[in-house]
Amino acid sequence: QMRKFVGMEAAFLAVVLLGRLGADAVRIVHPASEQEIEYIPDIPLWVRLEKGEGECFDIILNGKSETISCEEDTILSAQPRPGQHTIEVVPTFMPSSHGPMASSTFHIYVDPESRNKIPSWMASKDGMQIDIPHEVEDYHKWWYKSGVWIRTYWRGVVSHKAPSDQWNYQEILHDLKPAIILELGTRFGGSTLFFSDVMRTVHRKGTPYRILTVDIYKGDIDAQVFEEPNVEVLTAPSASRRMSDRVTALRKKFPGPMFVIHDADHGADNVTLELQTVAPLLRNGDYVIVEDTNLDGHEHAVQPGWGPSPYDAIVNFMAMNRELYQRDLEREKKWGFSQSVNGFLIVKGAGKREIVNPLPENPYANL
């Protein structure tokens, strides 16, 4: 009789919990039912649940359990291929045989006109993955582990850049002709001098422009940087209000595209805060570089175990703001390897949707 009582008590508890949760207690906000989502190589699936506080759910993709989450926002490791997919959520206090409390069927597609489509010369046989030759990966890892990047200079000042990336940047700048360069992370100033020299030729006819370079410490910056007439050094956190306010003012004064390079503190949280702070300042046609995504977070990392890196920041931010950028794969892979894996981005969806911030609180917002 005791067993019978315990069984009845458990059943009663389940009924009470289900009654408390109600039929609409959890809702799959993203991906919404019937939603069309563009396939972007290497960008995982973002799931947002509308649920009660403290409630945990088993998130099931196409019949396979992906993870148990107690959060409203979850980035799955899965990167579903083009086609129809179904997300289901089952509360963790219920057996999986009970069935889902909510489900959503959505569709992933490839846009043949989008920069996100993998060019044929770098695509795997099925066209869905980027094929990286082992010779390229071997050289990339040699380049990093040899430390030659530490001994790379521009005008005698350390730049910490791959020469192939710098060549790519000057091609982009000549095509884009930006009115503003926003460099987040100055360090010694070698790359700032590089951008200044290139921009002088881009704007050789006299069109106005400004380079804003931002760092929390200016003591290491080479004196040449302060002598550049179109370079402005801002001593502030890279995700601060002072940075965003200054960019807002510059965009009013210098109309035209903006080129942004994220190269400050490489921790995933800091890069995420930068992305969140810069996103509202962007306009369609702007170009964004996220550097040092080669460190960790993927199978081709040059320093596995480094920890949450710029790569984690950008793929998660793109998962939650999928329409904001398109990957410029032709540029990214032009020279084989890059420090900016998944980091050559063209702004295409500025203002289209409200930016979703992975980190709701920015400690630098009032600085």
Image (cartoon, rainbow, N blue to C red):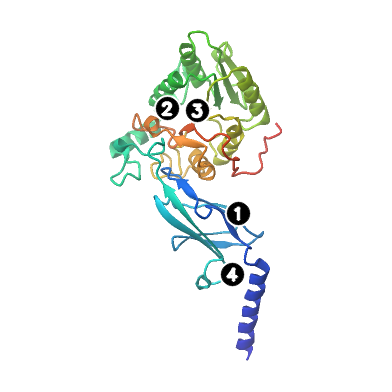
Q: Do the residues labelled 2 and 1 touch (CB within 8 Å)?
A: no
Residue 327 in the image: state x and y as whole percent: 44, 36
Task: Indicate the secondary structure of the residue bearing disc 2.
Answer: helix
The residue wearing badge 2 is 149
Disc 2 versus disc 1: nearer the observer: 1
Residue at the spot 64% in from the left edge and 75% down from the top edge:
15
Q: Which of 345 and 29 is in front in this view?
A: 29
Disc 3 versus disc 1: nearer the observer: 3
Task: Indicate the secondary structure of the residue bearing disc 1.
Answer: loop
Disc on the earlier residue, 3 or 1: 1
The residue wearing badge 4 is 93
Residue at the spot 59% in from the left edge and 32% down from the top edge:
278
Residue 156 in the image: state x and y as whole percent: 46, 15
Crowd rating for badge 3 (residues with CA inside 10 Å; few <14, some 14–19, many 20+)? some
Type of amino acid under label 3: Gly
Type of amino acid under label 1: Glu
Q: Where on the picture, by quarter, is residue 13?
A: bottom right
* Separation of marks 2 and 3 at Cα, in angstroms: 30 Å
The residue wearing badge 3 is 285
Q: Are marks 3 and 4 in contact (CB under 8 Å)?
A: no
Type of amino acid under label 4: Phe
The residue wearing badge 1 is 72
Residue at the spot 57% in from the left edge and 30% down from the top edge:
282
Disc on the earlier residue, 3 or 4: 4
* Separation of marks 1 and 4 at Cα, in angstroms: 17 Å
Disc 2 versus disc 4: nearer the observer: 4
